[in-house]
Image (spheres, helix red, strand yellow):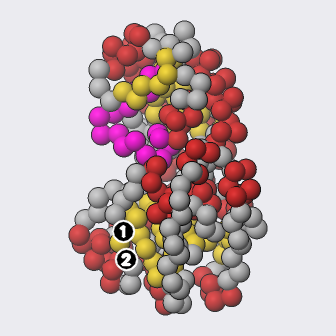
Amino acid sequence: MKIAVLAPKDSRFQGSRYKYTKLMEQFAKVEYVMENHERHVKTADALVVYGDKRDIYKVPVRHGRKYLLIEHDVATLRGLNFHDQEREMVQKAGVVLTTSEDHADYLLSQYGIESTTIHLRPLKSMLNYKTLPKLQGNTLCYCGGLFPWGSRTKRFGYRSYHKIFEEFTKRGWRVHIYPTKRRKLSVEKEYKAIGCEFRESQTQDNLYRQLSQYTAGFQGYNKIDVPEIVYNYSQSCRPNKLWEYLASGIPTIGFQGGNGMKIYDGGWGVALNSLDELDNLQLPVITKGMQEEQVMDNDVELLRTCIERVAD
């Protein structure tokens, strides 16, 4: 079977795009297509498109083709005005895939469409790396997007981490940031001013080795001055970071990390009710068994079934 994953030209082959594509490669030939979409629509056995604000779903619709829609984010759930496009995109999909049960419930309530949820866990093959020596002291890593403090009242305000990281540094932690995108110098200065250190962005296949040198990883969001609808959206997600640090062999520290925190709390991580709890923190020891149990490979047959439902 030949699968075409139709992606926009500015698409980054990271996170959900990397993981879902690699999982598909376990049972089919996959092409990650960033141009000449029309040609691939005509030749592929099955089509996959990413949703959220993207309108690339219109390509298979023009050709009367079914498609698997991956709703890795849900635009209207975070307050964006994409209701008409989102409705068409979801209702015309042959199969809808979500990363979060909360997002699946939302799509069902809004559009009457059921979806399948496959979490963004790592693939087993991604666990084959040589760990780095541990850094001295208490070190925290964060891998993801981050925004300036002045943006906290806007739609990505939940990623203005200043007050949270400041509390870690006050309690003797060294905070290391791996940004997912090229950051502005002004943003970097803001975080450095509170003691954070920056590292170079990593590709998905090298990420876990780099993160293995730290004491723990952070998963959570800022709540201060964030619009309610935006913050509530953050709490509904099941982000990569619920499992990224586990895959790196380090425990997860969660604070305001949303409904997904219950997945790791008491297992490979700790969910804090207050940052004051950092003073008496008891972190779990990560085992190989924990890592191998939480891999995306467990969902390969589920994904294969979804693909077969849209294949010609």
Quick one: 176 or 42, which is closer to the camera?
Answer: 176
Mark 1 lies on a secondary structure that is loop
Query: Does residue 135 appear anywhere in the picture?
Result: yes
Sort mark 1 into few (<14), some (14-19) or many (20+) by Cα contacts within 10 Å. Answer: few
Where residue 162 appears, x then y in whole percent? 42, 77
Q: Amino acid at mark 1?
A: Arg
Q: Are marks 2 and 1 in contact (CB under 8 Å)?
A: yes
Question: Which residue: 46% across, 63% down?
Answer: 210
In magenta, the rendered stretch is 3-18
Sort mark 2 into few (<14), some (14-19) or many (20+) by Cα contacts within 10 Å. Answer: some
- Indicate whether residue 16 is drawn in magenta: yes
Q: Which residue is mark 1?
A: 199
Residue 113 versus residue 298 in the image, above or below: above
Question: Which residue: 33% across, 15% down?
Answer: 38
Query: Does residue 233 appear anywhere in the picture?
Result: no
Residue 305: which disc? Answer: none
Q: Quadrant of residue 246?
A: bottom right
Numbered disc total: 2
Where residue 286 appears, x then y in whole percent? 69, 66
Where residue 235 appears, x then y in whole percent? 59, 58
Rounded to the nearest angstrom, the CA distance separating label 2 from label 1 is 7 Å
Q: Which residue reaches farthest left? A: 185
> 303 left or right of 79?
right
Q: Which residue is mark 2?
A: 197
* Image quarter hosting the C terminus: top right
Q: Amino acid at mark 2?
A: Glu
Mark 2 lies on a secondary structure that is strand
